Structures are given as structure tokens and as C-alpha cells.
Amino acid sequence: MARTPDDDRLDLLQGTLDMLILRTLQWGPQHGHGIGQAIRTQSDDLLKVETGSLYPALQRLVKRGWLKADWGVSRSNQRAKFYRLTPEGKKQLAREESRWSQLVHAIGRIMKPASAPGAEE
Amino acid sequence: MARFPWSKHRLDLDDDDFAEEIRSHLAIAQQEKMADGLGERDARDAARRELGNVTLATEAARAVWTPRWLSAFREIGADIRIGGRSLARHPGYSLAVFAVLTIGIGLNVAVFTMLKSIAFSPLAGVEQASELAVVHGETAAGRAVRLSYPEYRALRDQIQAFDGVMGTVLMKANLGRGRGARQIWGELVTGNYFEVLGIRAALGRALTPADERAPGRDPVAVISDGLWRRDFASDPAIIGRSIEVNNQHLTVVGVAEPGFHGTAVVYDVEVFVPVMMGPALGFTFGSKGPATGLFDEPSAPVFHPYARLRAGASLDAASAEVDTLWTRLRRERPQADATARLRVVPFVRAPGGAPSYAMPTLAVLSVMGLLVLAIACANLSGLALVRGISRRGEIALRLSLGASRRRIVRLLVVENLLLAIPGAMAGTLVAAWGIPMLIGYAQRLSAPLRIHFNSDIDGLVLAFAVAAAAGSVLIFGFLPALQSARVNLVTVINEDASPRSAPRGRLRSGLVIAQVAVSVTLLVVAGLAARSVAAARSADPGFDTRQATAVSFDLKQNAYDEARGRIFQQHLLSAVRADRSVEGAALAVYTPLNMTDTRVDPVSLDAYAARPGEDLAFMWNVVSAEYFRTLRIPVLAGREFESRDDPSAEAVAIVNRTLATRFWGGATNALGRRLRIAGSEWRRVVGVVEDLKYARVDEAPRPYFYVPLTQVYRSSVTLHTRGRGPVDTLVGQARAHVTRIDPDLPILTARSMADSTRGALIFLDLTAMMLFLFGTAGIGLAVIGTYGLVSFSVQQSRHEIGIRMALGATRAAVVRQFVARGLRLGVAGALGGVVCAVAAGRLMDAVLFGISPTDAPSFVRALALVLLSITVASLVPAARAARTSPLSVLRHQ
């Protein structure tokens, strides 16, 4: 099989998708397609969320009480289901962000030990 | 949308909402693509492609909501639906499996029910009856003896391991007086009998220790629910009424709870009387003193006490305690009787009980039942395997659509259970219908006395049926299921799966070998058992049952005392002998071959010094003159009893051949010797007669002796006559002779000797019938199964046959080769079967009569039948395959 440009895209770490979804919704309610597009454009097309992962993830976040979903109408006048953060979801996002920065910091120290202190400044 | 009241989440994905969301996603995506300049159609297709597999996404979203246990539950539900559909599509296969399981499980349920009624739950209505312990004495020679009343009392009061000890002795009792009298089973019981068993009275009260104060003091009785219903039309005013048992008036104080049939397994006991009334009912228990003192006599054997173990106490602990007690009792009164030690045994091993007699036979039947089931399973395994091969396509399709192999195996097992559970239920129904027929047959033979088997289909039996079904599925369904799930996708899809791919071929060969081995074992066991039963049935009982009658009556039932009784007996014999059609007439106390060991008494023998610990105690009979001539029992030496052996003459006895040869070195040597029943006078031996089968046809020869009725009066006797003409007429005539002398004397039984001794064949007949069923079912299954497997494997090799024939092999050569292949498997299986059968035969040795466990004809017949069926099974399909044109076979591939 020939390599496609898609192969350059990055696979999402387990659990990272949930954080990205929460982050995307920080600026206001959005529907599933919009969330997918937002993640893609904001990552300069490096991250592409598969529909097969996105919608189950949305269901998971709703079940945990971090998102709420309501049917509404999109800018292009399409009926769509809009997700928004609940207060509980906002707290979760904060937790995830701090955990993420810790993780990045830790991995950074391992991958570039010499320059790590400098990079921190 | 499912939601449990206690769950804060719904348990399922909102399907419609989710589908709507996906649709909206597509619409928005399509709109954006169109905005980018794509045409409507292209935009829609692109959006679809981007979306990917919606089903998988939906499943993943569903998994978020649905707990694992619920989805597993749903999957099994789906398995049941799919399995049901698949079975319905193949009614032939389904019916075959169902039928085979019905037969296999039905036979096993029947045997298990009998086993239950004898061993696991032998006493209807009694909780944990199988956990009762029985205490019995044992002589140095190992003969079981009853315990005396004082010994019982000591056990009851002093053994800590026992939570309650009661005593009971079975009696044949005459109920009523005059023409309406009949014989029933009764029990003489201690006052705590009902309390220890945990049986209540449905009406009135049960017997209590207050009914056991002194001999003859409490003339009361409890009757069974059955007797109350049959004889007293469920009269609610029965309490306080008087019934007559052995001419003794007893007041009915209670009716036992329904479903209780006493403690004598197989016998239906209808009346329970305090043991202290025993002497008043004519039972002296071998006491030599005055009957009223027998309960103080430490050597008068009364009964085998039954005990409940205290919670936590073991049989061994009880045994140890009983041993200590016995040692102390022996110190207090040295060597009172022949009892050397006491034994505490589980209920099933109660001496003389039906369980101890029936267990070995039931064990053989159980093994045969399991063998039949094993053959059935091997058969079904073969069928499932064949079917598994033919449904490789379906399984491959399921696998390629993403089903896991575990899921496939589960589907196949569920499918098998769908057949096995109804099969088990149908088998139970067959057993539930068949067992009463067997019991009815046994009841007819033992009439007028009633029998009872605790053979209800209860929870225990149902649990066994289900376990048998589940076990069968595991055996017949699991291997082929694993085999099927191992389908190789590529080969199946390319349709070039070789029919003789190695693992399946090995499994099939293994199945053939196993099936042949089990078949040979079953056939040998069935053959041994059948030949043993036949040998027992045709065994010479030692007397001539043809043209002979047996009419029983008890003179006490019409209030004859000894003097009047003697006159009656004398009159009767002269009247019958005066009849010109009668060739011989005699009276006797016991009829031979009546299944029960009659009374045994210790005996001293002239000129024979008993070895230490040797137990000289024999059964004996009281007979009139002409007894041996009437029953055509050969007199080997000396003479029979004659009228001159009256009370004033010398006391005489006649012994049998075994007694004469074992103790006096032969028939002629025995003449003139003397023997003495313990506690009575010496008797001169005036004759030696041939051995008989005294209780059962399959008994070993045993010493036995006779004393004349004229010297030892008995009121309960049987009149034997022999004559010409139809035997029914003879019975009628004999009966008429009795009633002509006393019309009010009840006749207890009146039948031909052939009918009278048929009772001894009941068990053999029942066993023979079961063996026939098992044998037929087993042989049928074995032959069909072997045929099926072998012929299937030949059919699978049609390709090979085609090639061989195309290359010039002759038909005969091909057929020969396949028959040889079949026989190789057959011989391997047969060798295994012979090894198993020899082992099984050794286990059966105890129940075999008259043949050796390595009886050659049984083995030869079994082997011949199995090898013949294998030959035919290979020959027919191979010949058919060889007859088809090689081209058509090859093209078919």
C-alpha cells in the first residue's frame, strides 16, 4: 500500500481526545462536526479526529456529566446537536490542563535532558 | 430506552437521537464541501467516506452506556435466537439429537430415580433418611444379629454422638378377623419412633415414649394415611376406633402424615404398634423365658436400632463410643449370646434391608446407563462434527464479519443446550411414565402385600437430569465446536478445504475408536448381566413348582388354640389326601423362594465341635408328613416325616445335603446324629434331603433343617398340594378344602407354587427388563453411530477414491482398502473396549450369578457384533463410492 499524506498525521494519545473536546468547547457550544473541524484546523491539519472516535467520546463525556447536549440550528441553518461545557466539565478541563502540562514537562525532560532547564525559562 | 429504577444513567444509547446526530453531521459536512465547490453528489459521497463505519461508531457509543453484563446477557439472547433459527432450518439433525438425548437421559433418570428411592432418599417423608445410622450386632463369623431391648436402651441413653435412637421391627400382620382379614406390613416400634424420624400425625397423635411403659400395657396403634384412606374411607372419626391386628384389639390413636410409608424400604407399612405390644401380637423374639419378660432379657434379639447422629458427630465417632459401651456391657454380663461386636453403619447398609440387596444391581445398572449416555454423546459428537464441517461456510462468514472465535464456540454450545435441555425434560417424562409401570409390575407380583418406592420425580431427580444434559453437551458439543471455530478463513473462502485435513481426521478416528470401545464395554456388560439373569432364572430351585399349590392361612385369625389347631390341621390333611385328584398334600410354615431370609436360630450339632468364633445358626422350617414328596424334593438318605413323629415319640429332624456334608461328612453319616436348637431338646436326624433355593434363586447353598409340625405346633401354615389337571383348578380345590372345614377362616393367599415363587424373580425380572432396554438402546446407538462415522469418513474420501480409480485401481481394491481402514480403527477400539470390559466385569463379579466375569460367549458376541457393524459401515459407502464414475467425483470437487 502506498503511503498517503494521512500517515503524517499524529495519533491521539489515549484520553487526550476528551481534553481536546473540552478545550474546544471552552469558547462556546458546538456541534460534533464543528468540534472535529476545530481540532483539525487549530492543529494545522496535523490532528484528524475520526468520527468513529469522536461521537463515542462525546457520549462518554455526556455520561460523565461534563457536557450537556441540546438540539439547535447551525449558522448554515442546519438542525444539529450542540454540546456545551457544564460547570463540572469546566473544572475537569482545568484538571486535565494542569495534568497535561505536567506530562509535557516530564516527557520534555526525558527527551531533551540537556536543554530542558533552559527551555523552561 | 432501557433504564433501571435504581440506575442514575440510562442503560442504552438513544439510538434515534444518535442516528439523527449522524445525519446532521453528514448534512453539515456535505454543505461545507459544496461551499468548497464540489457538486452535490460528490460532496455527499466525500462526506460519507470521511464518516467511516457508522455501525462501529454506533457500537462504540452503545458500549459507553451499556454495562458489560447486560451486553453479555443480550448476546446470549441473540445466540439463542440464532441457534433456534439454525436448528429449525435442520429439523432432521435437531430431531435426531433430541431423540438420542431423550433415550440416553431418560434411561439414566430412571436408574437414578431407583437409586434415589433406595439410597439417597429411601424413606418418603423422612428428612435426610440416608443419614440415619443403623446399629447391629455381629457374630464372630460376620453374621448380622439384632440387638436386645436392654442393649437398645443402653445405646439410647448413653451414646453422646446420637441425637436420638429408636428401634423398629418389620412384621407381617393380620389385619381383621374372619373372612375379611388380610395381611399387611406393620412395624413394632419404640415410643420415640415418630419423634426421631420427625414424622407428625395428620390426625390424632403419634406414638410417644408414654406408649412404651410395660409389655401389653398400651394397646394402641398409629395407621398410615394409605390404610386410613383405603380401609376406612378417610373416616374423620377414626381416632378412638378399634382395629384388630393378630387378634389383638388396638385403639387407633393417630393417622401418620401422608406420604410416610414406614422405615422398611420397598415395603408399604400400614400400621405402627408400640414394641411393648409385641408379645400380645404373638412375637416372642426368640425369648426363652415368659414373653412378658423379654424386654429385660439381654439376649433376646429384637431389632436393629436406628439413630440420628448429633450435628457434627461422625459415624466413626459414634462407632468408637459404641465400642466402648459394648466392652463395658460385656464385662457386666459375659458372653450372653453370639454377638461379638456392634457395628454402626449408614442406613443403606442396614442388614437385610432392600438397599443392601439392591445396591450392587443398581450400581451395575447405573454404570450401564452412563455407558449408554456416553455412546449417545459419542454419536452426537460425530453428528455435530459432520454438521460442523458442512456449516464451515456459515462460520467463516460470521468470523469475517467480525465475530470472535469465542463467540462462535459459545453460539454452538448454546445451540446444543437448546437441544439438550428439552431432551433432558423429555427423558425425565419418559422415566416418569416408565417407572410406575415397573413398580406396578412388581406390585402385582408381591400382592396382596403392598410395596412402596419413593420414586417421585423430585428436585434431586430434575437436578440430575439437567446435570446429565449439561454434561452431555460439554462432551458432545464442545470438541466439535472448538473444531468448527478453528475454521481457516482463507481455505474455506477459496473452497479448497481438504476433507481429510489432519486435525479433523484425527478427531474423527478418535471418535470411532472411543465409540467402539464404549460399545464393546456396554455390550459385554449387558451380555454378562443378561446371561447371569438367564442363569439365575433357569437355576433349579430344588423342587418342582409345576402342578403344585400354596394356600396360606393363620388359625389364630379365627381364634384356634393349639389343641383345636392340631385337630384342624389333621382334618385338613386327611380331607385333602382323600381327594382322588390329589397326589400329595402337606403343611409347612415357610414357602421356599419367598425372597426373605426366614428365621435363623443358633444350633448345636452332635459330634461336631464348633471352631472358636464359628457361628452355627441356620434357617429352618416346620413341615408335616409328605412335604418332600409333595414338592418333589429328593430324599437322599433316611426317610421323610411320618405320622408316627408325634409329640410322644422321639424328637426328630431332617437336614439338607449341605448341612450333612459340611458338618457330618455326608448324607449317610448324618443319619442318627443329633442337633439341637438353642434352648430346646436334642433331635435325632432321620433323613437327609436335597438342597433348595430357600430365599432367592441366586443364593449360595446353605445348611438348613426341618422339624415335624406334629412336634412343633405353628398356627400360621401353608397348605401345599400336588395333582393333575390345570393348576388353577388345583388351587381352587385346595382353597375349597380349607373353607369347607371352616368357612370363616380367612385365606391369606391362594396361588400356584409357580406364582408364589415368582416373587423371587421380581428383582431378576426387573433387572432383565432394564438390561434389555439398555442393551437395545446401547446396541442401536452404537451401531448407528459407528456406521455414521465410518461411512461419513469414506464419503469424505470420494475425491481420493476418484483419483485412485482414475489411476487404474480396481473397485475391489478400493473397497478392500476402505474396509481395512475401518477395521483398523475398529480393532483398536475393540482392544480398548475389552480392557474396559474386563475391569467392569471384575466390578460386576459380586452381582453375577452362575457365570464368570470373563465369560467368553459374552465377549465373543459383543466383539462380533461391533466388528460386523464396522465392516458393513465401511463396505456399503465404499462400494457406492467405487461404483460412481471417477470423472463425476473429480468434477464434483
Image (tube, coloured by chain):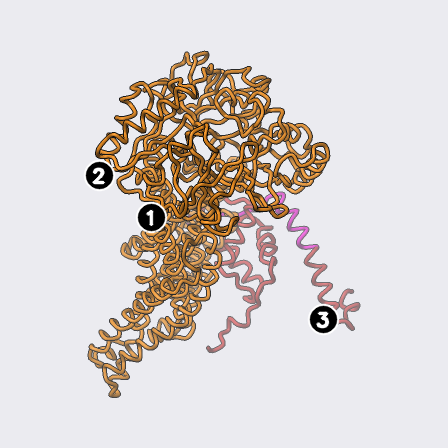
Chain colours: A red, B orange
* Lateral position of residue B869 relative to residue B110, left or right: left
Looking at the rendering, in which quadrant would you find the C terminus of chain B? Answer: bottom left
- For mark 1, name the chain: B
Q: Is residue B239 above or below residue B481?
A: above
Q: Earlier in the sequence, mark 1 or mark 2?
A: 2
B400, above or below B620, in the image: below
Q: Which residues are magenta?
A: A78-98
**Given the image, on which type of amino acid does mark 3 rest?**
Met
Residue behind mark 3: A111
- Asked if the residue under mark 3 is in contact with the one under mark 2, i.e. CB atoms within 8 Å, the reply is no
* Three-letter code for the amino acid on which mark 2 is drawn: Arg
Residue behind mark 2: B724
In the picture of the structure, the residue carrying the numbered disc 1 is: B769
B189 sits left or right of B100 in the view: right
Mark in front: 1 vs 2 = 2
Spatial CA distance of label 1 from label 2 is: 33 Å
Q: Is residue B85 magenta?
A: no
Residue at 27% in and 31% down: B577
What secondary structure is found at the residue carrying circle 1? helix
Q: Is residue B36 visible?
A: no
Q: Specify the subunit that label 2 lies on.
A: B
Q: Which marked residue is nearer to the observer: mark 3 or mark 1?
A: 1
**10 Å crowding of disc 3: few (<14), some (14-19), many (20+):** few
Q: Furthest residue to the bottom?
A: B808
